[in-house]
Image (cartoon, rainbow, N blue to C red):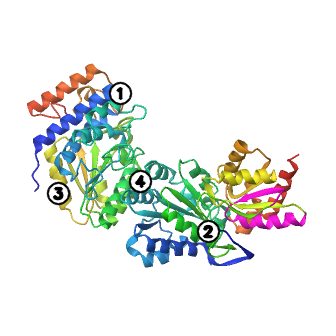
Amino acid sequence: MVRLLKEFKQDTREMREAYCAALIAAAEADPRVFALDCDLVSSVGTGAYVKRFPDRHLNCGIQEANACGVAAGLSNRGFVPFMHSFGVFASRRIMDQIYISCAYAGLNVKVVGADPGVTAAVNGGTHMALEDAGALRVIPKMTIVEPSDSVMMEDLVKRLAKHEGVDYLRMARKKGIRLYEEGSEFPLGKAAWLREGTDVAIIASGVMVYEALRAADMLAEEGISATVIDMYTIKPLDIESVVRAAETTGAVVAAENHNVIGALGSAVAEALSENCPVPLERVGVMDRFGEVGPQEYLMDIFHLTAGDIVEKAKRAIERKR
Amino acid sequence: MQQYDYDRMRRLSADIRIETIKALTEAGYGHIGGSLSIADALGALYGGVMNIRPEEPDWDERDFLVMSKGHCGPALYAALALRGYFPMEDMKQINRGGTKLPSHCDRLKTRGIDMTTGSLGQGMSSAEGIALANRLKGLSSYTYCILGDGECQEGQVWEGAELAVQLKLDRFIVLVDDNKKQLDGPVENVRTGQDLKKKWEAFGFHAQRVAGYDVEAICDGIERAKEAAGVPSVILLDTLKGLGGDFAEKVAFNHYMVMNWDMANKAIAEIERRLAEGTYPRGDVRW
């Protein structure tokens, strides 16, 4: 059951705090949980876990490929490893290790990539994962999730700890907008329907969910009724929800903090064209490299704001004719 | 010192070569060179060194082996079949569609294969993870990892080496098949002036170089490695790519060969001849 807060506000808790609390809870519930870091304990925010479970933690140092392989070896012997780094290193840098040593080998490894897209902000283009989900989505049987607030973060981590397989968690680490009431549940592979409208459906993930909700309000002021879906599982995609959204509105906007090539927008396009072709507009980074700057600035220059979603929504509605 | 039946090991190594040659000849081609050079180490490991239960491949307290140079799976499959993990008949299915014996090791497909490998360098890390996990579980089992000499060009090997030393994984034993050749030719042409032993020592490993074609020398090396407390070990196996398969010994490029039964039968006869003569597996091969 998903319950939206009546009023959205700046979260009092960082996403990484919620992550770490959930990791500690998972480790308390399951002695097999083990954490690996790559010299980013203070960035990723696993310090409290390290303090609580020093014997079930390994800081591998600056060697993501080895850390991923060690995680695979631990999984081979029954542990449930959670491996952390920045998203750029936890995906494209170690794609082959995730592919061969973890996924192809049929093991159970949780990879956590911090700072997706514009949330990397002042770390800039080298650290801005705009392709992590797209790169990993082509690995068979991968599960890719992107929480949109801290309540969802805790619930998803609990589920990943119990889920057998290779999973990638796309984690904004700073404070975001709090969207959900405590106790909301987010089963893997299912979308959360936040608004039901009739004219257009906005399918978003991560930081773009709040923008999508704002866009829906802006559209409502112009008499346009929008569905808003939080597609927190990028793979496997909830195709049923995509199709129902298309059937009930006839126009779709996919909104993601990622290159428009490869991840949510691509997945939605694939699902629509195979099942229910309706006009689709994509909001995301238009095949550009990342840049340095504050998150708000980056959202502006990459056209990732509620206003950009509104514009694309109208264009999609226009194309219905 | 542990006492081993070296005659049994030499016979097992000869049979690993013979069955590998037969299987790859049946397939028509395959990664023969590196499979032949690692046969004596496999004969030692599966002929008494490793604590394993072929009737219970997933026995929790067993020793583990990760064939990081995954393309030498065929030699490992021969060892496993000879030890009864699966029928020798299965060797005829190497590389066939739907086979349980793919060209590179796959833990999901083959009984007795501890880890999936094939992307060079990665087995170092996963083997290290297995060794760490076994220590965390309070087990006294050993984890062996077989690398190629060419494979040591992969950066991941050295990431793994650093961490293994840091973790003091003294039940982690790396065997490097120093067979002097990689796919494109002699290793020394690709990477000049390397002293692998010094390099491993510089990383903090207990390092030895032994005659990699001599099961007694291999076993002695492993015993010394086990005695080295608080550090992981590496044993550089002085071998020659293609050793013990006379058609492979005679050609420059033997990483992957097309084979026929004339070549195979002659090679098998030569293996038996050298074994009977007591010069097995080198014969008069010099390097």
Quarter placement of the C terminus of chain A: top right
Q: Secondary structure at mark 4?
A: helix
- Expressed as whole percent of the image width and height from the top left, the position of residue B278 reads 9, 34
In the image, residue A207 lies in the stretch drawn in magenta? yes
Q: Residues within 10 Å of mark 1 (few under 14, many from 20)?
A: some
Q: Report which residue position mark 3 lands on.
A: B224
Residue type pointed to by label 2: Glu
- Expressed as whole percent of the image width and height from the top left, the position of residue A144 reads 58, 57
How far apart marks 3 and 1 lie (CA) works out to 39 Å
Q: How many marks?
A: 4
Residue B184 higher or lower than A124, as above or below: above
Answer yes or no: are tags 3 and 4 on the same subunit.
Answer: yes
Magenta stretch?
Answer: A197-222
Q: Report which residue position mark 1 lands on.
A: B27
Q: Earlier in the sequence, mark 3 or mark 1?
A: 1
Badge nearest the viewer, 2 or 4: 2
Q: Report which residue position mark 4 lands on.
A: B156
How far apart marks 2 and 3 lie (CA) works out to 56 Å
Answer yes or no: are tags 1 and 2 on the same subunit.
Answer: no
Chain of the residue where label 1 is placed in the rendered structure:
B
Label number found at residue A185: 2
Quadrant hosting residue B88: top left
Q: Residue at x 43, y 54 (%)?
A: A107
Badge nearest the viewer, 2 or 3: 2
Residue type pointed to by label 4: Gln
